[in-house]
Amino acid sequence: NAGVTQTPKFQVLKTGQSMTLQCAQDMNHEYMSWYRQDPGMGLRLIHYSVGAGITDQGEVPNGYNVSRSTTEDFPLRLLSAAPSQTSVYFCASSNPGELFFGEGSRLTVL
Amino acid sequence: SQKIEQNSEALNIQEGKTATLTCNYTNYSPAYLQWYRQDPGRGPVFLLLIRENEKEKRKERLKVTFDTTLKQSLFHITASQPADSATYLCALVFAGGGNKLTFGTGTQLKVEL
C-alpha cells in the first residue's frame, strides 16, 4: 500500500500565482485533512473532509480552497499565492483515530 | 480556544535512560490524546492513543499517562536509543471536535551515546 501520497514534494511560486497540491490515499479512509507546519507554530489545520462531497474549514483556511469529489483524493488549491503561505504542507487521512500523514510538500512563495 | 503546550527546548539524554516528555493543555477536556513521532523532512507517524477514561497506555518501550485533573499527558521512552532521536508531537481531539486533531509544537529529543 502506498498510504497517503502528496505531490509535488517541492514547489516555488511567485506571489499571485495559483497552484494545486495533490493528495491521494488508498486506504479507503473517509476523513482527510490538510495541515501546514511552520517553525514554532506546530501543525495547524487548514481544511478537512469527513467524506466525498463534504468539506469544512479548520483553524487557518484563508487563502486556500479544497474539494472532495472522490474518497481517494483531496486537493488543496492556492488561488493567489502570498509569501505568508510559504510552509510545509501535510495531507493526512484517518478512519477514525490515528492520522496517516503524507511526506509533505514544501512550498516557497517569492 | 484550545491550547496545547509542549516544551520547546530540546531534551538531551544519555542512551539507556528514560526520556519523559510533557504535554499540557488548557480549556476544554479532550476526548482522546495521541502522540506522534516526526523525523526531519518526514511526515508525523502515529505512536499511541489514550482516551479520557484511561490513565495509562503502554506499547513496547513507550508509555503514555493521561491526567485529566492536571490537564497533562506524560510520554515516556524507556531504555532510550540514539534511534529514538526525533521530534515528538502531542495531539488532542476535543469533545465535539469530530476527528479534528489539534497539535502541540513538539519537543525534540536527542539521545546521546
Image: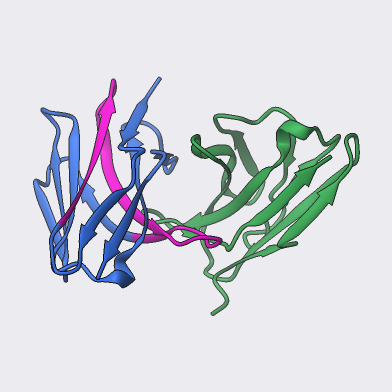
Chain colours: A green, B blue
Q: In this rendering, would A101 be left or right of B20?
A: right
In which quadrant is the N terminus of chain A drawn?
Answer: bottom right
Q: Nearer the viewer, residue A53 or A32?
A: A32
Counting every numbered tag in the picture gives: 0
**Where is A76 relative to A104, above or below?**
above
Res. A74 in view: no
Position in image of residue B68 (x %, y %): 14, 32
What range is drawn magenta here?
B19-46
**Where is B6 relative to A94, above or below?**
above
Asked if the magenta segment contains residue B43, the reply would be yes
Residue shown at 57% from the left, 62% from the top: A102
Residue shown at 52% from the left, 69% from the top: A27
Q: In this rendering, would B65 be left or right of A63?
A: left
Position in image of residue A91 (x %, y %): 59, 54
Residue shown at 53% from the left, 62% from the top: B42
Position in image of residue B107 (x %, y %): 34, 46
Q: Main secondary structure of the magenta part?
A: strand
**Where is A26 relative to B40, above or below?**
below
Please identify the residue farthest to the front as the structure is shown. Answer: B113
Residue shown at 45% from the left, 58% from the top: B44
Q: Nearer the viewer, residue B106 or A50?
A: B106
Image quadrant of residue B19?
bottom left
Asked if the magenta segment contains residue B31, the reply would be yes
Please identify the residue farthest to the bottom as the structure is shown. Answer: A1
Res. B78 in view: yes
